[in-house]
Image: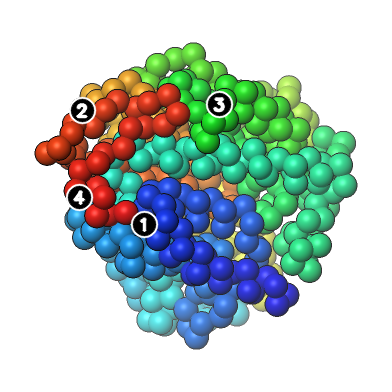
């Protein structure tokens, strides 16, 4: 376990070193993606009354440290505290309101009422999980061409990761145990489709599969833009990662890839952005749709049964528990029930009577519709914003990068409807998308920036660009 705790601290050292040598966007991308792929799960440094420092926040604290030391100009010019940044402040205030509204104990279930420090802890937890990575991405990605660094790092990192993925497909998920000394999840959850679903250094095989979806979309986007990543042909990378995705044995992830990868490969950036907006709207509308009698539960289960009877039964179980938890959440719909099992459906004595899978219902139950709007708004807002500003972006290649990333953010948000949150890098991607499409174009007094090149976007050589490195 010593190695696991030591590994958690490495971003605090590595990130500043990367910022001292690389462009800010590239340094941040390498730190965030490498941390997701390599750091241990389910452990953290406990802090009194506050959420633990873990894989979900230490890397972004390291990025902030590196930026303060070597890219302070970017942080200062980001003009934080406006737009979707306001959702982070609302989220903190709403967490305090949740605590104040739930001071009453649940006597029959034996659950204590909340105190003000519980609201503070809940707010900080939300901010560290979603707000911090969003603000980091928003501040360090300033132009659409910066997104090349992010997509290239995700694509190449996934390629380098596939040998570990293939090993676990054959031998079962053991690498996390061999390196860090423990399993983050019961290995029985990993048996799917007559074999083992790889986890590597993710908490769940679902988390790894979703990352492979993102990497496949990233590679396909770069191929569509006729770009390479570190001299790797992206068309070949996309085909290879797509094959690994199928072998990862996750039904939902395979469906995501089967729908979105052809959209990126065949359709233009306008349609890519429109599809992303439709998915984003579906995410925000889902709680209200779920309450409606028009929700097509039976057709969905029937369609799923044609794919896999086992997955259809699993989905039906989720729907049943979702309905119970939603009825519970509607008793306190604005600010929710708060943590400490108060939001769960409990038997007398505190025994659980329901199971929560989707991150959306967990968020609504704990933080109410206000919390849901803030947590998912940080993902949805940049997608809609990038679609609205797509016409202002110069160059088809840069528009393609923006549209591809918007699809990645949208599918990350959509996956939080049936599943939990397995990695918070989606908030980093959303922040990068918002920052890259919001900042005004930079003009150099010496030389006008050229178009995106074949091996990557042309770099701005203006003084303010050099100073920010």
- Please indicate, yes or no, whether residue 86 appears anywhere in the rendered image: no
Q: How crowded is mark 4: few (under 14 residues within 10 Å), some or many (20 or more)?
A: some
- Mark 1 or mark 2: whose residue is earlier in sequence: 1
- In the rendered view, tell whether residue 324 sits above or below residue 437: below
**Are the residues flagged by discs 3 and 1 in contact, CB closer than 8 Å?**
no
- Mark 4 or mark 2: whose residue is earlier in sequence: 2
State the image quarter where residue 148 is shown. Answer: top left
Residue at the outermost bottom position: 48
**Are the residues flagged by discs 1 and 2 in contact, CB closer than 8 Å?**
no
- Mark 3 or mark 4: whose residue is earlier in sequence: 3
According to the picture, the residue beneath numbered tag 2 turns out to be 392
Q: Which colour scheme is used?
A: rainbow
The Cα–Cα distance between marks 4 and 1, rounded to whole angstroms, is 19 Å
At x 36%, y 32%, the residue is 457
Q: Where is residue 467 in the image (x, y as percent from the top left)?
A: 24, 55
According to the picture, the residue beneath numbered tag 1 turns out to be 136
At x 68%, y 70%, the residue is 4
At x 63%, y 47%, the residue is 207
- Please indicate, yes or no, whether residue 155 appears anywhere in the rendered image: yes
Q: What element carries label 2?
A: helix
According to the picture, the residue beneath numbered tag 3 turns out to be 234
Q: What element carries label 3?
A: helix
Q: Is mark 1 on a helix, strand or loop?
A: helix
- In the shown orientation, is residue 105 left or right of residue 127? right
Q: Is mark 4 on a helix, strand or loop?
A: helix
Q: Nearer the viewer, mark 3 or mark 1?
A: 3
């Amino acid at each position: 376990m010593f190695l696991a705790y030591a590994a958690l601290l490495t971003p605090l050292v590595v990130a500043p070193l990367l910022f001292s040598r690389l462009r800010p966007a590239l340094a941040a991308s390498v730190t965030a993606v490498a941390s997701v792929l390599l750091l241990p799960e389910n452990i953290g440094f406990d802090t009194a009354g506050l959420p633990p420092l873990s894989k979900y926040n230490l890397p972004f604290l390291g990025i902030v440290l590196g930026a303060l030391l070597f890219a302070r100009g970017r942080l200062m010019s980001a003009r934080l505290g406006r737009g979707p940044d306001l959702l982070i402040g609302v989220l903190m205030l709403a967490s305090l309101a949740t605590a104040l509204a739930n001071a009453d104990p649940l006597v029959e279930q034996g659950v204590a009422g909340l105190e003000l420090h519980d609201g503070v802890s809940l707010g900080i937890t939300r901010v560290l999980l979603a707000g911090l990575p969003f603000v980091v991405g928003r501040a360090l990605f300033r132009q659409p061409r910066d997104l090349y660094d992010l997509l290239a790092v995700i694509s190449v990192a996934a390629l380098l990761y596939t040998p570990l993925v293939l090993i676990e497909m054959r031998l079962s998920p053991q690498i996390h145990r061999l390196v860090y000394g423990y399993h983050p999840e019961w290995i029985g959850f990993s048996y799917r489709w007559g074999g083992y679903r790889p986890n590597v250094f993710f908490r769940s095989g679902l988390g790894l599969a979703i990352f492979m979806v993102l990497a496949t979309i990233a590679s396909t986007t770069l191929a569509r833009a006729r770009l390479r990543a570190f001299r790797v042909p992206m068309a070949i990378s996309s085909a290879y990662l797509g094959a690994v995705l199928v072998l990862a044995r996750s039904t939902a992830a395979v469906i995501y890839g089967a729908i979105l990868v052809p959209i990126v490969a065949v359709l233009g950036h306008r349609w890519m952005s429109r599809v992303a907006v439709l998915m984003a709207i579906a995410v925000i509308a889902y709680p209200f749709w779920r309450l409606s009698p028009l929700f097509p539960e039976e057709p969905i289960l029937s369609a799923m049964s044609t794919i896999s009877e086992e997955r259809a039964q699993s989905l039906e179980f989720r729907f049943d528990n979702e309905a119970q938890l939603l009825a519970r959440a509607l008793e306190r719909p604005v600010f929710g029930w708060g943590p400490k099992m108060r939001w769960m459906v409990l038997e007398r004595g505190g025994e659980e009577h329901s199971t929560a899978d989707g991150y959306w219902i967990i968020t609504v139950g704990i933080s109410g519709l206000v919390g849901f709007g803030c947590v998912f708004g940080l993902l949805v807002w940049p997608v809609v914003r990038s679609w609205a500003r797509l016409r202002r972006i110069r160059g088809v290649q840069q528009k393609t990068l923006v549209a591809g990333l918007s699809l990645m953010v949208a599918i990350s948000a959509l996956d939080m409807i049936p599943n939990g949150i397995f990695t918070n890098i989606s908030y980093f991607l959303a922040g990068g998308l918002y920052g890259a499409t919001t900042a005004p174009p930079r003009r150099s007094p010496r030389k006008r920036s050229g178009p995106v090149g074949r091996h990557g976007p042309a770099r701005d050589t203006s003084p303010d660009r050099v100073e920010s490195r």
